[in-house]
């Protein structure tokens, strides 16, 4: 799991390098286009100087290798994830797929180790950092002590889940109106983590996530 995360970050850095090389030649492209083989081939056909062409050849070769490695690790994650306790529960939440579900379960471990939703949120470090200065309490940005890959995966899942869940979407819009877009996704991620806590703790499986209906035995 940490290896896959590192490979993804390396691939992103290489895509940024391609973007910079093309910008220097007055060529504008969307970084998203570099996610497909078609996009990579298009880059190789662009008019750049010979030195830049060699750079692009090497970088794209590296990206292709990373794509293969990331895909293999992703497939392995999916296979291993199905054997983890809570897999069916967590992946019944719209927005949490096989890979992200496996990552979250691996980060959480045994849900019974956490006495409450707040304890789990603290473990993921998505609670505000609080300082005490001159007897005045100040809430700052989120803490950074928890699992970075866990936080990143949770935020990514939240961005998808709010498209399906009226409950999360309403919460997202209400907080956004009060605090702006900077803090809203973290607050909503904490809300989703509360849902994750409950489905794992009480072994619940959603039958209909948007309507918040669970399967009955």
Image (cartoon, rainbow, N blue to C red):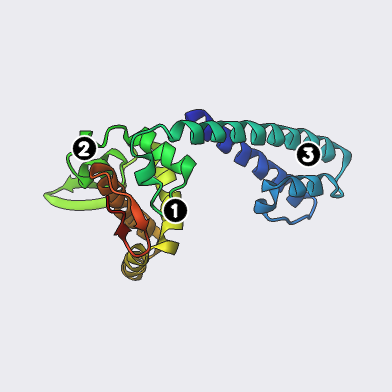
Q: Residues within 10 Å of mark 3 (few under 14, many from 20)?
A: many
Which labelled disc corresponds to residue 56?
A: 3
Q: Secondary structure at mark 3?
A: helix
Give the residue at the far top of this rendering: 3
Distance CA(mark 1)–CA(mark 3): 35 Å
Report the mark closest to the observer, 1 or 2. 1
Distance CA(mark 1)–CA(mark 2): 23 Å
Q: Could you tell whether 167 is left or right of 98 in the image?
A: left
Distance CA(mark 2)–CA(mark 3): 48 Å
**Residue 176 sits in quarter:** bottom left
Q: Could you tell whether 165 is left or right of 2 in the image?
A: left
Of the pair 171 and 14, the residue shown nearer to us: 171
- Can you identify the residue that label 2 sits on? 114
Task: Please say whether residue 6 is visible from this viewpoint.
Answer: no
Q: Residue at x 61, y 36 (%)?
A: 71
Which labelled disc corresponds to residue 95?
A: 1
On screen, 49 above or below 192? above
Give residue 30's position: percent from left, percent from top: 68, 55
Q: Earlier in the sequence, mark 1 or mark 3?
A: 3
Labels 1 & 2 near each other (Cβ < 8 A): no
Q: Residue at x 48, y 30 (%)?
A: 2
Give residue 180's position: percent from left, percent from top: 37, 65
Task: Please say whether residue 100 is visible from this viewpoint.
Answer: yes
Give residue 121's position: percent from left, percent from top: 27, 44
Q: Secondary structure at mark 2?
A: loop
């Amino acid at each position: 799991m940490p290896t896959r995360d590192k490979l993804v970050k390396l691939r992103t850095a290489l895509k940024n390098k391609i973007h910079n090389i093309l910008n220097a030649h007055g060529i504008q492209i969307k970084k998203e286009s570099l996610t497909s083989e078609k996009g990579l081939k298009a880059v190789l056909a662009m008019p750049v100087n010979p030195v830049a062409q060699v750079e692009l050849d090497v970088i794209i070769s590296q990206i292709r290798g990373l794509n293969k490695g990331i895909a293999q690790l992703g497939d392995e994650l999916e296979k291993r994830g199905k054997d983890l306790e809570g897999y069916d529960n967590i992946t019944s939440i719209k927005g949490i797929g096989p890979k992200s579900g496996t990552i979250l379960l691996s980060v959480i471990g045994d849900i019974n180790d956490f006495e409450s939703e707040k304890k789990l949120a603290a473990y993921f470090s998505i609670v505000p950092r609080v300082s005490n200065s001159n007897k005045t309490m100040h809430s700052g940005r989120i803490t950074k002590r928890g699992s970075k890959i866990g936080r990143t995966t949770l935020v990514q899942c939240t961005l998808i889940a709010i498209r399906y869940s009226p409950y999360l979407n309403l919460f997202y819009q209400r907080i956004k109106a009060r605090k702006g877009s900077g803090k809203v996704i973290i607050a909503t991620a904490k809300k989703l983590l509360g849902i994750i806590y409950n489905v794992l703790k009480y072994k619940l499986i959603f039958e209909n996530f948007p309507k918040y209906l669970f399967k009955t035995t």
